[in-house]
Image (cartoon, rainbow, N blue to C red):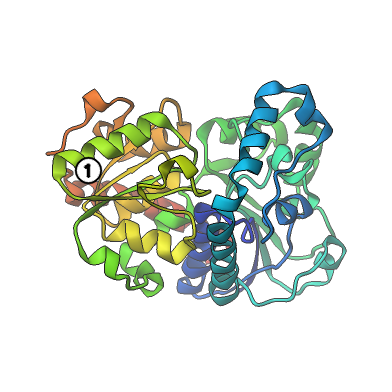
Amino acid sequence: MKVGILTFHNAHNYGAALQSYALKQILSRLGHTAEIINYRNPVIKKKYQKQLNAGIQFKTFLHPRLWLQKMNFIINKKTMRQAWEQQYERFEEFIGLYLTDMPQIEFEELEHLNYDVLIAGSDQIWTGSITGGLDKAYLLDFPFQGRKVSYAASIFGGSVPVEDMDIMRRCLKEFDFISVREKTLADSLSQICGKKVVTTLDPTLLLESSDYQFLLKKDSRTEENYIFAYYVSEDDVLRACALEMAERLHIRLFELHYYMKKDYDKHSQFANFGPSEFISFLAGAEFVLTNSFHGTVFSILFKRRFYSVYRENARIENLLNRLKLTNCHIYSIQELDDNLQIDYQRVMDELQIYRKASIDFLNLALGE
């Protein structure tokens, strides 16, 4: 089968890039010709520019807290600029090397592409607040004669907003197979469109750690023992836990942030990583602390000792519950245990059960 994938492959986000890579890889392994279609949602495309932009709009002036955040961004722009530009270049390099070398196309051109199957997903492709209103491209709402499938698609919050129900109902009735990430969303969509909707694993979990070895980059800094802290969003508790764990284990702490932080200039902080650097540093860490879903995913895949530090996160919580790793969730320094041990043989046995079910869905959806 010739399979086209529509997803957030161009988002400069480690999870977005690596889930795109993983889905393409697993489809190829299943014997299909898989391509990521280089359609870029205009709102997402605008968000990831090489030049730093505070994004000040009229509504910024109406909210003092938002205004303060934007002013702080402007003040720290000089500190952030160089790392941001390097991060941008590394993501673009990764996209070109591993995801797609297809010329960028517009929505109007999608109906002219020649595929047997189109797959929408993974990621939050049906979240209108991310795409500037529901994007018809990710609903496959254009003329197409082949099979329509969604794989681990998602909506922020896990349910369909009332204002989106009609278009979701109309478009999803045209899908041959539907899978999403969250159980609540599966139940909601099943009621809306009257079709069977199943849950499947995030694509990154369909591969083994060995399948990512090709992406790893050598770095002399990863040859020593170190702790790796990845902040998908800034959090004081996560920072405190990372500092405390580094002190307890008497090893170096590397911190990955989205932007360089001026007040952390005495730390070993980075914000210039691409996807390859991200998994390279995570894979070699003695211990990982993160508030990221994909930080958690790759900690598990590379069998690292780790803590997911969060107050509320349904995606991480669902994964940790599935794999019986709830002891790896904390939200205070008092919960830290520097002697934490994880039975990864048991964890991988559990993961294999869910992995098989997800791959079985792909085989069924693609007609194997």
**Which sits in the foreground, 114 or 240?**
240
Task: Determine the residue located farthest toward the right in the rendered image.
Answer: 108
Whether residue 183 is situated above or below residue 286 in the rendered picture? above
Looking at the rendering, in which quadrant would you find the N terminus?
Answer: bottom right
Q: Nearer the viewer, residue 142 or 198?
A: 142
Vertical placement of 217 versus 333: above or below?
below
Q: Residue 327: x percent and y percent?
A: 24, 32
Determine if residue 134 is in view: yes
> Is residue 14 positioned above or below 198 on the image?
below
User: x, y percentage for residue 300?
Assistant: 30, 50
Horizontal and vertical percent position of residue 156:
61, 35
Location of residue 237 (image quadrant): top left
- Relative placement, left or right, of 137 versus 245 is right
Residue ID at (83%, 32%): 58
What is the crowding at mark 1: few (fewer than 14 residues within 10 Å), some, or many (at least 20)?
some
For residue 271, above or below residue 144:
above
Q: Quadrant of residue 193?
A: top right
> Would you say 314 lies left or right of 89 here?
left
On the image, the x and y values in percent for residue 38 come to: 70, 68
Residue at x-position 33% and y-position 56%:
282
Residue holding disc 1:
246
Q: Please state which amino acid type lies under the numbered disc 1.
A: Ala
Number of disc labels = 1
Tell me if residue 352 can be seen.
no
Q: Identify the element where label 1 is drawn.
A: helix
Going 28% across and 70% down the picture, which residue do you hit?
220
User: Which residue is more in the foreground, 244 or 161?
Assistant: 244
In terms of depth relative to the viewer, which is nearer, 355 or 234? Answer: 234
